[in-house]
Amino acid sequence: MGDAAYAKRVLLASGGDVVSRGIASGLVTHGCSVVLVGDEGALAGTAEEARRCGGGGVAVVGLDPDACDEAAIDAAVDRAWRCFAGLDAIVICYSYEGEVQDCLNISEDEFKKTMKVNVMTPWFLVKAIAKKFRDSESSSGGSVVFLTQIIGAERGLYPGAAAYGTSLGAIHQLVRLSAMELGKHKVRVNAVCRGLHLRDKFPVSVGEEKAEKATGEVMPLRRWLDPEKDLASTVLYLVGDESRYMTGTTVYVDGAQSIVRPRMRSFM
């Protein structure tokens, strides 16, 4: 399948982290045009790196995922829509991990921020873009892709992430429910559930030595996630036409970390 089949116009909601940088570069390399939406300062490096990949165009639209309301999100999506005369997909990578801590120590403000950035802002983004897809009357509709991780999945729970894991668990359900209701508008909704990489908060919190021990002795593929290379191809597939009959689905890209989680706990 050539790159032309994946030349989509994609809104990538990003905090400028290493995961979304890898996805942005992968999309642009395969001919997609990408509008990065988020804090403009944090996204400067992501935009520069993506532009060096050639292929599609890259634009940036400012939005604060922590402080924005629905009206601000609608305005940002409208600006993003105009960057390339319409959009074909949205990939939502916003993620606020917070601190790894005992659940009884999570403050009210921390819990509210976690839900705002990880659930409310993504949902308002989906609402705004789905209305655009519906009203554009495109024959191909549109694709929504959430980027989540195994900390929010039923088979990948980790201690110290009560707020973060709960917010990601909500995304798993949102994928199913919104897919059920948006299908009539030819809008597909799926998720990529990623494994952990060594710069994630949980591996950092347990220490490099323990994390490396788990790598060699427990993980089936004997390595952690490579955030720059392991996710883009799956996102590209869900954005493209080859996945046109997939909706309401969560695809695990975790090297089977979630399957061996009970064994990992004895090491970590």
Image (tube, rainbow, N blue to C red):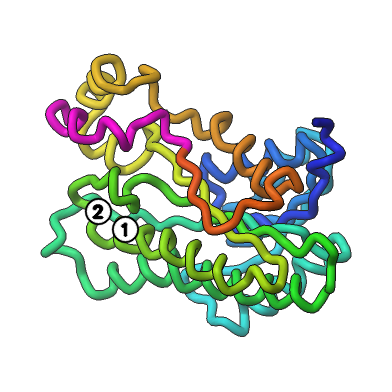
Numbered circle sitting on residue 61: none
Judge whether 130 appears above or below 207 on screen. below
What range of the chain is rendered magenta? 253-268
Q: Is residue 52 visible?
A: no
Instruction: Indicate the quadrant where residue 156 lies.
Output: top left
Asked if the magenta segment contains residue 257, the reply would be yes
Judge whether 99 appears above or below 83 on screen. above
Between the residue at mark 1 and the residue at mark 2, the CA separation in whole angstroms equals 5 Å
Q: Give the image location of residue 258, x and y in percent.
A: 32, 37
Residue at x-position 70% and y-position 71%: 77
Residue receiving disc 2: 161
Q: Amino acid at mark 1?
A: Tyr
Asked if the magenta segment contains residue 258, the reply would be yes
Residue receiving disc 1: 164
Taking 252 as reference, is 47 left or right? right
Residue at x-position 52% and y-position 52%: 249
Q: Amino acid at mark 2?
A: Ala
Taking 135 as reference, is 247 left or right? left
Nearer to the camera, 34 or 89: 89
Asked if the residue at tag 2 contacts the one at tag 1, i.e. Cβ–Cβ closer than 8 Å, the answer is yes
Nearer to the camera, 149 or 113: 149
Q: How many marks?
A: 2
Q: Is residue 125 visible?
A: yes
